[in-house]
Structure formats: C-alpha cells, structure tokens
Amino acid sequence: MRFRVSLGLFVAISLLIPRPGSAGEEAAPSLQAKFGSKFVVGVALGGRVPDEYSDVERKLILGQFGSVTPENCMKMTAVQPREGEFHFEEADALVDFAEKNRLQVVGHTLVWAKDERTPAWFFRDGDKPASREKVLERMRTHIRTLVSRYRGRIASWDVVNEVLDDNEPDLRPSSWLSIVGPEFIAEAFACAHEADPGALLLYNDYNVDQPRKREKLIRLIGDLRSKNVPLGAIGIQGHWEVDQVPFKDIEALLVAMKDLRLKVMVSELDLGVVPRGVWWADGGKRRDEIARTDPLAAGCPPDLIDRQAAQYAQLFRLFSDHADVIARVTFWDLHDGRSWLNSFPWKHAEYPLLFDRRASPKPAFQAVMDVKP
Ligand code: 9MR
C-alpha cells in the first residue's frame, strides 16, 4: 500500500513538473509521459553520469524516462572489490544526477547469487574457505553499508538476483548456497529492510516467464512469504529476442503475480535481433567460429527493424493491458550503441533498443508510442 502511494505521487510529480532546460522548448513525445500514469518507464545507465554522456544522450535520458538503474556501478564487484574497500564515486554521482533531475533510482544489485559475480574474497578466509558466519556477516555489512548510505533516496532495491537455476534444482548451485544455505536469501531481505524500511525490495531474475522457472519462482515466493520476508515486488528481466518473444508465457507470469498480489517490474528490457542460441548450441562446440562472426556489422536490415517495432508494440500493449500489476518497465540501456548485447555472448553489432547509435528514435519507438492507451 505504501508503495502505491509513493508511486502515484512520483508519477504525478514527474508529469507535472517540467525538467530543467525544458522551459520554452516544445515537449518531444516521451515514453514516461505516455505510460507514466500506468507504470514508470526507466533506463539502465552503464556510463558514469553525467560526464560520460553527450548532451544528446542526457537530453534523451531526461526527456524519456522516469527512473534510472545503475547498470554496474552498485554491484558488489564494483562497490567492494576488496573487503572493507568501498567505492561509491560513480554510484553517488548517479544518485545526485537522478535527484537533481527528479528521476527515481533503482538500486542494483545487493546479492548476485553467482560465484563469478561475487568478488573472490567474499568466500575466502586466508587460505581457507570462509565459514558460514563470516560470509553472512560480510553480506550483512555489504547490504547495510549500501542501503543505509542511500536511505530514503533509493526507492527500490534489487536485493537478490538470479538465484533460480535454469535446469534441475530450484536454486542455482553457488558458494552462497553451499556455504550459507538457502537462508542467505531471507537474510539479505531482512537486512536491507532494516537498513531502509521505506525501500521497496525486489527479487530479480531472467527467464522466469518460462513455465518451469515460473513454477520455481512461485515456490520461492511462497517460501519467503512463509518466513515473513519483506518481499515487495518481482523484477522480471526481459532480455528477449525478436521473433521469439514468449508473449503467452509473459502474460501467464503477469497473471500469476497478480494472483499472488505482487507487483512486477520489467527490470531489464531489450529485444535482441541477433539470435544468441547458436553460442550454446552443440554444447558450445562452434564458439570459436561464432566468435568471428558479426552478422549485422553493416547495419540492421529494414525488415528486422520493422519486426522489432511490431513486437515491441505488442509487448507494450500487453504491459498496458496488465498495468494493474506492472509498476515499472526499465530498458537495459539507453540506445543500441550502449547495449551489453554488443559484447554478449560474443562481440558483434546489436540493435536491441528503441533508440539507435545516434540516440535517435527507431521505428520501435514510434510503434510503442502508437500503442493505444
Ligand atoms: O549489462 C551488464 C554488463 O555491462 C555487465 O558486464 C554484466 C556483468 O556485471 O552485467 C550486465 O547486466 C546484467 C544485470 O546486472 C543482471 N541481469 C543480467 C544483465 C545482463 O547480463
């Protein structure tokens, strides 16, 4: 309930108050203005703000979006690369920029439950593996330090990221799980809540639209609720691919979350145009060969651009139809040139967003703006 009030207030404020620099200028069509009464439209920022963004890019951020997510600078590997050595310069700059410009901030991410996304020191104690108590204490210190630093300034936090496994077990094998056990999840939420009782706390994951992973998510939610964990909403990442968007499964997930009375944030949206499955096909035997390919280096063909536009529009129709359960939709980066997909799973030109490399709107932007309210 508290979240509804603050979200409503935020939307009202962001729609009514013109942003700095907008006085006297004709307002460009804006995603946040169009969808803001239904859900906040956000963007992830990977560069240091504001200095690593051009004037055109800054204008795009301020003109189109109502919230920002730091793509990397609040991650454990960036914030605390060595025990007790905290780096907040980039994160502070982002929060300051957001506040000056009346943008909400999404904190991302406190515990990323993969070993390769956790600094190695976290699980070591000298030349021995760290004990359960040590890892828990380190986790609490990390969460407390970040969340209390931005208390009242960061509206929502991705507390635990990607704990669900893609294959057989419910929970992904990791040192988090083997050293602490599944209790680290509930502990992380409890600790974040204690540090800022006003922040909305999210569980964030990918592929949870796929039926088997959706069932795992539902079990996880049930388990956390049975322990009175302050779980505020679910982040569904949304790294989908053109021609393979699982519209029906996404809708089924939204309905399932609504039944559970949980809000959803589409937390990392992009629609890649280069199929990624080839990287893992054949058990990865062709990776060397694939790593040398760059199929759309010369540009994205018009028919693909049009299909992307149509599928983005279909997605936003779906989001609008289920706006009662969706609180935010965040694009995973500002424009095609800044997308992580240009280097994942191998280095190649990608075109997954609404704006091109010059930060100009693509047909997908217009298609989304044309969606009937
Ligand atoms: O886009 C991010 C990329 O720049 C980083 O190198 C990578 C590792 O930190 O993380 C990417 O963002 C991920 C996000 O934090 C969590 N969900 C999956 C995203 C794409 O990998």
Image: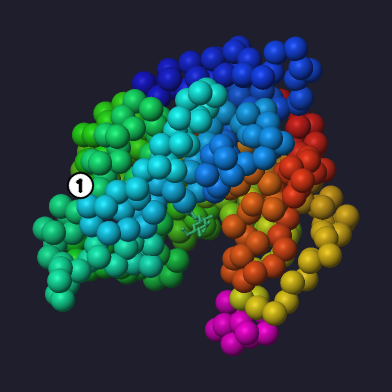
Which secondary structure, mark 1?
Answer: helix
Q: Position of residue 45 (x, y in %)?
A: 55, 44
> Does the stretch in magenta take in 282?
yes
Drawn side of residue 264 relative to residue 277, left or right: left
Nearer to me, 46 or 346: 46
Can residue 341 be seen by looking at this rendering?
Answer: yes
Pick the front one: 324 or 333: 333
Q: Is residue 66 left or right of residue 33?
A: left
Residue 289 horizontal/vertical position (percent)? 67, 85
Instruction: Spot the residue most to the bottom.
Output: 285
* Classed neighbour count for the residue bearing mark 1: other residues with Cα under 10 Å, few (<14), some (14–19), many (≥20): few
Which quadrant of the rendered structure holds the N terminus?
top left
Which residue is most to the front? 51
Q: Is residue 354 above or below residue 111?
A: above
Which of the pair 44/208 is nearer the observer?
A: 44
The part of the image, by quadrant, that contains residue 339 is bottom right
Q: Is 28 left or right of 233, judged from the image as shown?
A: right
Give left or right: position of 371 versus 51: right
Q: Position of residue 81 (x, y in %)?
A: 32, 58
Beta carbon of the mark 1 residue lies under 8 A of ligand 1 = no
- Residue under label 1, please give it: 141
The answer to whether residue 234 of the structure is visible from this angle is no
Residue depicted at x 38% and y 62%: 117
Q: Position of residue 313 (x, y in %)?
A: 74, 41
Determine the residue located farthest toward the right in the rendered image: 302
Q: At label 1, which amino acid type do we have?
A: Thr
Q: Is residue 32 above or below residue 90?
A: above
Q: Which residues are magenta?
A: 280-290
Magenta span main SS: helix
The quadrant holding residue 56 is top right
